[in-house]
Image (tube, grey):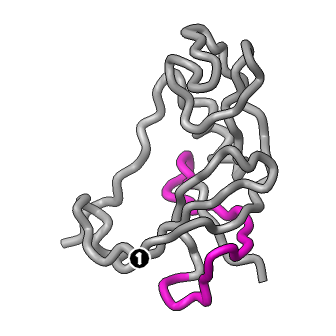
Amino acid sequence: MTTTRPLPVPDELTAPFWEAAARHELTLARCARCAESTLPPGPVCPHCGSTDPDWEFVPVDGHGVVRSWTVVRQSFLPGLADDIPFVLVDVELAARPDVRLIARLLDGVDAPLELGATVRLAFEDLDDEIALPAFELDR
């Protein structure tokens, strides 16, 4: 029996991010107080400490550099067993080197991955309204 893959549950803070992702657009939350970006947004800006960051979601280019990765070979969440093994990459975004994004590498576990490899943004469509940011090697 196959279990449905878990879906993100957007909340008040993250809904704009997920709405943009559904359109295959990557956005970062930018604090209205200090203009620094973060992902994911929280109730407090991690840069200036504002408890009223009034987040603005700004589109960014999805190119980046792999800083680390792991091959997931065991599923601890229901619904992911059918996807094992898969690669998660830690990507430093070219447009915002201070922001890192961890996401699936769609090229698979046999991809010629190395530290410093360049990647480009892709998306995994989980249903009509949910898409997850992912990456592909930039060859």
Residue 20 placement (x, y as % from top left): 68, 40
In the rendered structure, which segment of residues is drawn in magenta?
Answer: 108-132
Residue 6 placement (x, y as % from top left): 35, 53
Looking at the image, which residue is at 53% across and 48% down? 130
Compared with 102, 138 (above or below) is below
| Residue 74, quarter of picture | bottom left
Category of crowding for the residue at label 1, using alpha-carbon neighbours closer than 10 angstroms: few (below 14), some (14–19), many (at least 20): some
Comparing 8 with 66, the one in front is 66
Q: Secondary structure at mark 1?
A: strand
| Residue 46, quarter of picture | top right
Determine the main secondary structure of the stretch shown in magenta. Answer: loop
| Left or right, 128 with reference to 62 | left
Looking at the image, which residue is at 53% across and 56% down? 102
Compared with 139, 34 (above or below) is above
| Left or right, 112 with reference to 43 | right
- Name the residue type under label 1: Val
Residue 27 placement (x, y as % from top left): 70, 40
| Left or right, 113 with reference to 31 | left
Residue under circle 1?
71
Looking at the image, which residue is at 71% across and 70% down? 119
Is residue 43 inside the magenta stretch? no
Is residue 129 inside the magenta stretch? yes
Q: Quadrant of the N terminus?
A: bottom left
The residue furthest left is 1
Residue 35 placement (x, y as % from top left): 77, 23
Compared with 33, 76 (above or below) is below
| Residue 18, quarter of picture | top right
